[in-house]
Amino acid sequence: MADLANRLEIEDLKENLRAVQELLHRHQVVEGLVARQDMPRQDLVEQLVQKQHLAELRGKIERLHPADIAFILESLPLEERLVVWDLVKADRDGEILLEVSDAVRESLIASMDSEELVAAAETLEADEIADLAPDLPEDVIQDVIQSLSLEEREQLRSAMSFAEGSVGALMDFDMVTVREDVTLEAVTRYLRRLDELPGHTDQLFVVDRDQKLKGSLSLARLIVSDLEFEVGTVMIPELISFNPEDKADDAAQAFERYDLVSAPVVDEAGRLVGRLTVDSVVDYIRESSAEQVLAEAGLSEEEDIFAPVWDSFKNRWAWLAVNLVTAFIASRVIGAFEGSIEKLVALAALMPIVAGIGGNSGNQTTTMIVRALALGQLQAHYWRKLLKKELGVALLNGMVWGGLLGVLAWMLYDSKALGAVMTLAMTLNLALAAFMGVAIPYVQQKVGKDPAVGSSVLITACTDSGGFFIFLGLATLILL
Amino acid sequence: MADLANRLEIEDLKENLRAVQELLHRHQVVEGLVARQDMPRQDLVEQLVQKQHLAELRGKIERLHPADIAFILESLPLEERLVVWDLVKADRDGEILLEVSDAVRESLIASMDSEELVAAAETLEADEIADLAPDLPEDVIQDVIQSLSLEEREQLRSAMSFAEGSVGALMDFDMVTVREDVTLEAVTRYLRRLDELPGHTDQLFVVDRDQKLKGSLSLARLIVSDLEFEVGTVMIPELISFNPEDKADDAAQAFERYDLVSAPVVDEAGRLVGRLTVDSVVDYIRESSAEQVLAEAGLSEEEDIFAPVWDSFKNRWAWLAVNLVTAFIASRVIGAFEGSIEKLVALAALMPIVAGIGGNSGNQTTTMIVRALALGQLQAHYWRKLLKKELGVALLNGMVWGGLLGVLAWMLYDSKALGAVMTLAMTLNLALAAFMGVAIPYVQQKVGKDPAVGSSVLITACTDSGGFFIFLGLATLILL
């Protein structure tokens, strides 16, 4: 028993979530019963049962980590979400709002009045308030600013001034600084007075009187070193630092590559202005990889899976509209060859194969290149080499799959010429896919656009319209 | 100057990489000149220039972090990659092999003889050797095992016994342990004797004489506490621990949710067997999100962008083959309606629109559900609710886009009936897409398959064949 008490295993955590969900479900069932009996005055027993459930639920929730409560809120439909949200103690509202996804945050904020929102925001630190600010009403923000100290106001202003996706937007202000010329003994005494160090403090930053960064003293080093030494003799003078304007992507790569836990953020003059910690970086990595997956399917933002139909429609319509336009263009390409199809209706059945395989192959090329570009691994003088390789792969694919489909078409429609057209068209469309698969990310990068966005639609548009044109055009020339 | 010397900014790091690439490019140009002149005995001056370049390059490389060298190796074509690899000092080979991607690692290992490989592996720790082991020849592994201490052999055996994607495969053995009944003073003395703490040591693990985990003592707490206290009084008894068999995905979610830097790994009996650190977790998150992106385009593994054509073909063929089969089935569906198309050739031009938009819409539904499933946010009793919502979105989309396309078809072909068929077919195919978009991940999850794999192919297969069938079938019934 004692052994179990001091360990929180991942299964226990999952169990907690299940217990809350179970309680909610029961609560919902009871409410359902009450509603179904359609009584103006609820039965006393049932009222009691329900109150008991809610009390039990409140107890469970109180023992959960804010991130777990956020998780539960995200996995509930709106109505039940608000039941749980009401049970959360007001002083935890702020940290939970920070943890939930944007879509769910909106739904929670909409259920709170100004007073509650101000109270929630006041429990947070300046950099955290800055994260919430875009979702808060203007009057709430003004009230919150009033309640801050001068230093915190300055921090909030600074945190809100950096663009999303910059280091400045991710950094916090919880760094502990020391001077070069004090002894480790003095540092230790200073730290004891702090009582508790900010989370993720693996190192103290050494600064001069102008706040200029001079080096870093890790806690590990502080512990193993002789306390009579001065900070300047044991600190590490070389450390990786960021500028608030640096891209968060670059910072994330640096954290990954150099296995950092925290890193200083300095301004142009070399003054320490903030700190970046691995937990913000992990959150950032997760969020941006999720965004990428969603963007590839044309979901413009993270969708609350229980969002109303209308919200979902708005989140998805732009992508469908773009695809509709490209599909319509492809349809007009076919329309131009209606005469040929009328004469040889087999063309109608075979043409989607040519277009489809081109799209699949082109997307493989583009995916690989976009990834290399995102990692910064594609040097300018290798594009030509890459194009040659991709055209080689396309030719090989054309011979193998085009050849196979050619034989199938020949057997199905008993026409060698039709088979030959099929093989030739597939090879040409695969070559077009390879060329566009390299050219599209190349051009996007040249003109300063993110090659990850929209390249899949563009490549599919080319291989669809191009595939129909190549196949129907060749057939018209050769067969008719 | 002094200010600049103690800061490594992200731009400096990038500059280093550019300098090496520049040198390599020059080196390559010189080699090119030599080769083009086709002289059996190279000109002395050019030989000198080349040697100078190589010496300069070696100097640059020596100053780089192993992760940066790995990055450079990944961004070079094979030939140049091996030039750089030869310049790397042998004692750094091991750590660099750990950092590079699998495809590049294979190419580097292929260029080394057994002796070099054994020497490289011997510079690593047991858990790191386990990461390399799958790529090493059997005789090299045997030689390495011979060189290990008994404890290390046991660690290696343990690390290699856990499946990829488990916590056991990610953990290391660098944990520092202390007993409950010693004073912080004694702990501090003990740590000083260690001289240096292992990387990412933010806490010491408190164990009893049977290695059973009792709690955690963070370095921050050790520093701010009175040294006369015993470990047992200041340690935190509750901490999140993992089992080696736990899924790495769950561990990554826990690290993200609870902002961990390190966590203990304990066996069934509660004994401490290893440690998980945030740097391994970050690497894991990055790798699995990259794999997901690649898998969605049907790239079966991370591709070396400079791989030979044949290697690329092998990496991509399976996906193309699967898509070819589904495209062929769709083609046969069209084939069944050739008589209808012959009578009304407009059908051939319009049918890809119906199929295509269904695929786009179905993929949106599936992407959203797969993400919710991966996060564990979809409870069993909400599937029905979700299906209703998705069918609602499909109906709305059908009215809007189907209606628009219906009007376009009516105007293009001057046939109200054709327009009506278009609208009806699009609405039905969108409803099919919504149904399959929910049903496919639901079934995949029920039968224990990963819903992220293959759902996109399946949904597209349904909406293609289904779309052609619905549109051509309706047209045959209503128009002909």
Image (spheres, coloured by chain):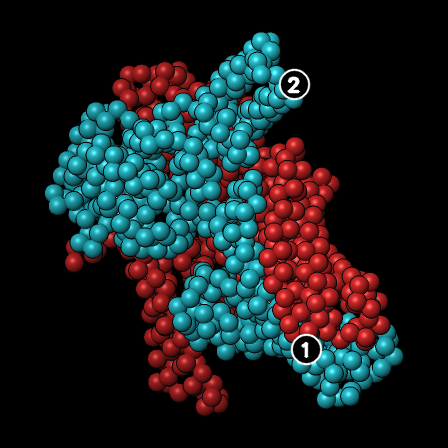
Chain colours: A cyan, B red
Between residue A239 and residue B187, name the one nearer to us: A239
Q: In the rendered structure, which disc, 1 or 2, sits on the residue that comes first in sequence? A: 2
Q: Residue at x 60, y 11 (%)?
A: A43
Locate residue A118, reporting x and y percent. Answer: 31, 31
User: Which quarter of the figure has residue B298?
Assistant: bottom right
Q: Residue at x 63, y 60 (%)?
A: B403
Q: Please, which chain is the residue tagged with disc 2 on?
A: A
User: Which quarter of the figure has residue A222?
Assistant: top left
Residue on which disc 1 sits: A335
Q: Amino acid at mark 1?
A: Gly
Residue on which disc 2 sits: A37
Q: Secondary structure at mark 1?
A: helix
Locate residue A273, reporting x and y percent. Answer: 22, 45
Q: Is residue B456 above or below residue B384?
A: below
Q: Is residue B451 above or below residue A90?
A: below
| Cα distance between the residues tagged 1 and 2 | 61 Å
Asked if one can make out residue B308 in the rendered structure from this viewpoint, the answer is no
Q: Residue at x 20, y 42 (%)?
A: A154
